[in-house]
């Protein structure tokens, strides 16, 4: 079971609480992009989170480029649980996204 | 301009090409989102900054161990292929780096590191001042100290210490057969170690009882002496040692590494005064103590200053005779200890930074040269399918290897230099503690890495937009890539030359300053004079006549040593700072406010050191204690009290006193002679008034004996040492000879700091000049290669070899001229800042500047020599045919 650092645990917790985009995680946790993004890549590599592209057509209809969003996986949930046992304070923190996007991101075709 | 888009494109270079597109899309989408949410520019910038670590993650993620090893071997091969450039780059960067690490380490240790005491920020040096007399940071009178200590509430406690006592006769075990040896000591007051915050390792500090002679005299050993002579035996306490013939009880051992107030103290002794001294005038009039105080909790330095000023005001009302106009001041102790070294160190640090910049410019130029020469190789690799990223990775790996090698070299160099510095006789505090600690190493390694990567990457990134067609085209010369880089390299050379000129001018100014110092006429002869210090123990010689008789016998014996022409005695050596200062005034005159130094001399002194008589007579053997009080004065003294006098002889017959007013009660002395001024305090100081007293009228227990030899050869002087030792031991076997030096050595020692600074700057200037020379040569050589066609055409059209050579030289001189103009401009600006360190030469001395320019022109000619020859040998047929 890989050990998460405090920052990574907070990021994972934020995603588990509903943050989808990289910048959401930044806003929720207060961590800078230089910390968040490399952590996201690492967690994606170890399959603790899953990264997907938004549906392009929906994004274009909304007049913006498609964004990449992240979800926690089963592996990620396990890892997060063990991390929360070490970092008690994280359990209580509200790391939900400040501006929730569309309620149900439509999975892309990829 | 789409800043963020450009940034992403730039940084995206690091992302593997297969992921790059998606990566860019993701970031673009997020940045766009921020824009829509009207996030502030600063927030957007901060968010965008994260793209770099993200791209770097991708970059390193791609590097599996296999690819890294592959890149490593490739890089090694590439570096080996152009060994000379690699070697040069490592050398230059390593030297620049090593020098920087040394200076950083010294600066950190000497200036930045806090003193090793408890809560050192609460310590201060307290001193007296008298603006009316120009006294500043002056030594303190004991009575004033005791009043401060009692009355000042902003201080927890204060302690006193005296001047450094050298060459005390010491025997470890009282009365045993152990041979006496000389040690250094300092007198301190009670609770000195407590106030300082560095408690003794063993035993205790001195107490008030020991100071007021209510208890037997005690001593505290230094830690080094305890481990050295006494084998760290805890039973050393209560043992007896002999100091200057007196037995003393050991009551403590100081903490290790205590180098305040002086380095290499062997023994700590207490001040001892008679209880009745507190009532006597001299206790408040004689200034000779240094005071260190510890602030009370919550008090600030400003509080303390104000309170001390108030106390001083009260004292000047209570004791008008001694304390009028006497004020106080304090300096935080850290500032007190290091303050004097700050300017020279800042100077050295600046010089090293300049040298490092020159080295960096040189390395950058070398890297550009490599990049230019490899443009074709890169084109071929690219044509064969190597991703641009792979090329970048190769370059980065090469850069890392170079950086590692340069760091290693620089580290070794720094260690060498720091080790050598420990043996230098410089009075910079804590210099011997400068070492390469992990912090300095980390800084050094970090700087090297950043510098090398920047120099490797920049040309790679800029130039690796490989224009395949242009590079591989049949008609393209080998040097197409070089052409583009030559401009950048020319700019670098101009920068190098400018900085080198700055350093050379600085070095030149210091050289002139040093030469000026050496030319100063000290007022006495320095050649062919040997000096010998004799300290007579007060325990065995308690009366003046005994001391006089002893020295008479020594001088008699010295006179008959073969090769000795004259023998003289005085209380202290020139340039040793051992004279004492007082007011003086003429008998019957109202004029006041004069200050003079004093020195006791015998009848042989003037002949021994060549003190020139201007009027009246020298000190004579007949000037004894029972006779009339007489004195000689220096020319400057006459100038100050009799400004209208046409000849120094006008002062003869006047009487003067060493106090503010001169009446019969003040023990006036009759002036019987006037001598030439001497630079007794330092060669760079102007002449000051001096009163010479016959030593028989003011007996001194410790004296310097001067032997003037018939020949000034060093061997002749060295040959006098043994006979002199025998003379002294014949007179009294228990009296060792101390401090045997020639006057030449004394002068040299007083100039040690100036000599060191000058040598250092000259070294830096020389190095910078060599680097600039190499850089210029490199650019000129490439220029000749790149413009071969033009040269060939010129030759074909009839230009002779001389004209071709001149063409090259002109190219070189153009670069140098631009660099020189910049450099001289910088030097004019910087000159003001170093003026304070110079003697008798201003920061804009035209001679130095002219010499610097001449040196630069010579350098340019040397640098252009080989390329000029290559240019003159261009074969027009070969060049034109290769088209």
Image (cartoon, rainbow, N blue to C red):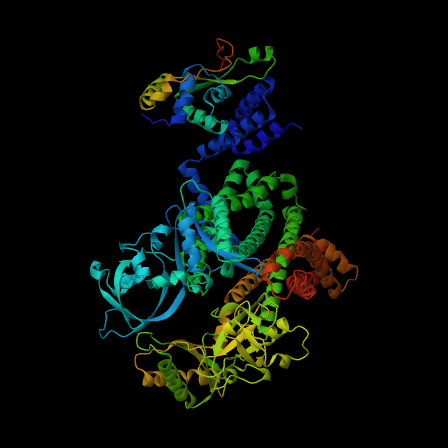
In this rendering, position of residue B113 left or right of residue B494: left
> Quick one: B738 or B436, which is closer to the camera?
B738
* Whole-percent x, y for residue B762 in the image: 57, 63
Image vertical order of residue B585 relative to residue B820, above or below? below
Give the quadrant of the N terminus of chain B. top right
Residue furthest to the top in view is A103
Say which residue appears at 74% left-offset and 54% top-offset: B790
> Quick one: B291 or B382, which is closer to the camera?
B291
Using the rendered image of the protein, determine whether residue B772 is visible from the camera's viewpoint: no
- Dividing the picture into quadrants, the one containing residue B632 is bottom right
Residue furthest to the front in view is B664
* Whole-percent x, y for residue B516 in the image: 61, 70
> Quick one: B606 or B753, which is closer to the camera?
B606
Query: How many marks can you see?
Result: 0
Residue furthest to the left in view is B235
Image vertical order of residue A32 relative to residue B781, above or below? above
> Quick one: B9 or B431, which is closer to the camera?
B431
* Whole-percent x, y for residue B399 in the image: 50, 46
Using the rendered image of the protein, determine whether residue B189 is visible from the camera's viewpoint: yes
Image vertical order of residue B529 relative to residue B101, above or below? below
Say which residue appears at 59% left-offset and 13% top-offset: A60
Residue furthest to the right in view is B797
* Whole-percent x, y for residue B501 in the image: 64, 58
Say which residue appears at 45% left-offset and 22% top-offset: A29
């Amino acid at each position: 079971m890989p050990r998460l650092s405090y920052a990574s645990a907070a990021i994972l917790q934020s995603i588990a609480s509903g943050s989808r985009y990289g910048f959401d995680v930044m806003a929720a946790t207060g961590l800078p992009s230089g910390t968040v993004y490399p952590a996201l890549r690492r967690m994606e590599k170890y399959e603790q989170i899953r990264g997907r592209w938004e549906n392009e057509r929906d994004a274009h209809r909304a007049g913006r480029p498609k964004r990449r969003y992240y979800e926690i996986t089963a592996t990620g949930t396990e890892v997060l649980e063990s991390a929360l046992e070490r970092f008690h304070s994280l359990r209580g923190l509200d790391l939900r996204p400040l501006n929730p996007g569309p309620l149900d991101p439509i999975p892309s075709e990829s | 301009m789409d800043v963020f888009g450009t940034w992403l494109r730039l940084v995206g270079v690091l992302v593997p090409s297969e992921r790059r597109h998606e990566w860019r899309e993701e970031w673009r989408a997020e940045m766009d989102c921020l824009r829509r949410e009207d996030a502030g520019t600063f927030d957007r910038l901060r968010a965008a900054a994260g793209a770099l670590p993200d791209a770097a993650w991708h970059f390193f993620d791609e590097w599996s161990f296999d690819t890294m090893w592959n890149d490593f071997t490739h890089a090694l091969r590439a570096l080996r292929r152009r060994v000379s450039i690699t070697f040069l780059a490592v050398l230059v960067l390593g030297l620049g780096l090593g020098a920087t690490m040394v200076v950083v380490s010294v600066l950190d240790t000497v200036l930045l590191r806090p003193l090793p005491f408890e809560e050192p920020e609460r310590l201060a040096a307290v001193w007296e001042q008298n603006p009316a007399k120009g006294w500043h940071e002056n030594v303190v009178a004991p009575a004033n100290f005791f009043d401060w200590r009692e009355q000042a509430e902003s201080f927890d406690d204060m302690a006193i210490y005296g001047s450094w006592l050298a060459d005390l006769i010491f025997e470890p075990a009282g009365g045993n057969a152990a041979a006496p040896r000389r040690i250094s000591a300092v007198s301190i007051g009670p609770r000195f170690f407590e106030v300082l915050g560095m408690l003794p390792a063993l035993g205790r500090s001195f107490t008030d009882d020991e100071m007021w002679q209510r208890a037997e005299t005690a001593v505290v050993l230094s830690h080094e002496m305890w481990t050295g002579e006494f084998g760290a035996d805890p039973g050393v306490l209560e043992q007896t040692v002999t100091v200057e013939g007196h037995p003393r009880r050991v009551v403590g051992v100081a903490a290790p590494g205590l180098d305040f107030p002086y380095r290499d103290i062997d023994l700590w002794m207490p001040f001892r005064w008679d209880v009745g001294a507190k009532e006597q005038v001299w206790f408040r009039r004689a200034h000779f103590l240094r005071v260190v105080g510890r602030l009370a909790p919550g008090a600030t330095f400003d509080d303390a200053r104000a309170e001390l000023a108030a106390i001083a005001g009260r004292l000047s009302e209570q004791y008008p005779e001694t304390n009028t106009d006497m004020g106080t001041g304090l300096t935080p102790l850290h500032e007190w200890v290091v303050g004097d070294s700050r300017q020279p160190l800042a100077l050295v640090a600046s010089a090293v930074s300049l040298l490092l910049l020159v080295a960096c410019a040189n390395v950058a130029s070398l890297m550009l040269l490599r990049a230019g020469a490899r443009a074709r190789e890169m084109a071929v690799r690219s044509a064969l399918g190597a991703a641009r990223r792979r090329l970048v990775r190769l370059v980065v790996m090469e850069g890392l290897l170079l950086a590692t090698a340069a760091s290693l070299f620089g580290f070794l160099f720094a260690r060498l230099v720091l080790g050598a510095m420990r043996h230098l006789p410089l009075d910079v505090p804590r210099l011997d503690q400068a070492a390469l600690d992990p912090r300095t190493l980390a800084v050094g390694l970090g700087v090297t890495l950043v510098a090398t990567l920047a120099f490797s990457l920049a040309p790679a990134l800029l130039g690796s937009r490989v224009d395949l067609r242009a590079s591989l085209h049949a008609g393209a010369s080998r040097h197409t890539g070089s052409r583009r880089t030559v401009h950048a390299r020319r700019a670098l050379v101009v920068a190098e030359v400018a900085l080198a000129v700055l350093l050379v001018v600085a070095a030149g100014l210091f050289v002139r300053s040093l030469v000026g110092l050496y030319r100063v006429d000290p007022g006495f002869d320095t050649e062919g004079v040997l000096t010998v210090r004799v300290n007579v123990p007060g325990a065995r010689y308690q009366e003046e006549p005994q001391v006089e008789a002893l020295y008479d016998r020594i001088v008699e014996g010295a006179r008959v040593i073969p090769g000795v022409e004259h023998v003289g005695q005085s209380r202290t050596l020139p340039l040793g700072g051992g004279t004492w200062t007082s007011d003086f005034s003429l008998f019957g005159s109202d004029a006041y406010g004069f200050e003079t130094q004093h020195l006791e001399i015998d009848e042989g002194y003037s002949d021994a050191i060549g003190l020139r008589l201007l009027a009246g007579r020298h000190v004579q053997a007949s000037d004894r204690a029972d006779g009339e009080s007489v004195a000689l004065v220096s020319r400057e003294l006459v100038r100050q009290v009799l400004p209208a006098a046409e000849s120094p002889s006008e002062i003869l017959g006047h009487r003067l006193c060493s106090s503010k007013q001169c009446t019969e009660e003040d023990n006036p002395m009759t002036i019987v002679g006037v001598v030439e001024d001497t630079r007794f305090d330092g060669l760079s100081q102007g002449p000051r008034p001096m009163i010479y007293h016959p030593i028989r009228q003011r007996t001194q227990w410790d004296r310097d004996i001067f032997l003037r030899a018939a020949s000034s050869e060093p061997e002749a002087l060295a040959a006098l040492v043994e006979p002199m030792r025998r003379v002294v031991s014949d007179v009294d076997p228990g009296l060792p000879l101390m401090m045997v030096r020639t006057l030449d050595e004394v002068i040299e020692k007083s100039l040690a700091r100036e000599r060191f600074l000058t040598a250092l700057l000259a070294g830096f200037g020389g190095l910078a000049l060599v680097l600039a020379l190499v850089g210029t040569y490199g650019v000129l050589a490439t220029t000749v290669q790149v413009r071969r066609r033009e040269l060939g055409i010129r030759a074909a059209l009839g230009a002779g070899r001389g004209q071709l050579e001149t063409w090259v030289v002109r190219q070189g001189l153009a670069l140098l001229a631009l660099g020189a103009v910049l450099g001289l401009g910088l030097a004019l600006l910087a000159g003001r800042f170093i003026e304070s360190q110079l003697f008798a030469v201003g920061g804009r001395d035209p001679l130095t500047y002219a010499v610097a320019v001449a040196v630069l022109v010579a350098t340019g000619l040397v640098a252009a020599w080989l390329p000029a020859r290559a240019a003159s040998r261009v074969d027009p047929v070969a060049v034109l045919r290769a088209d």
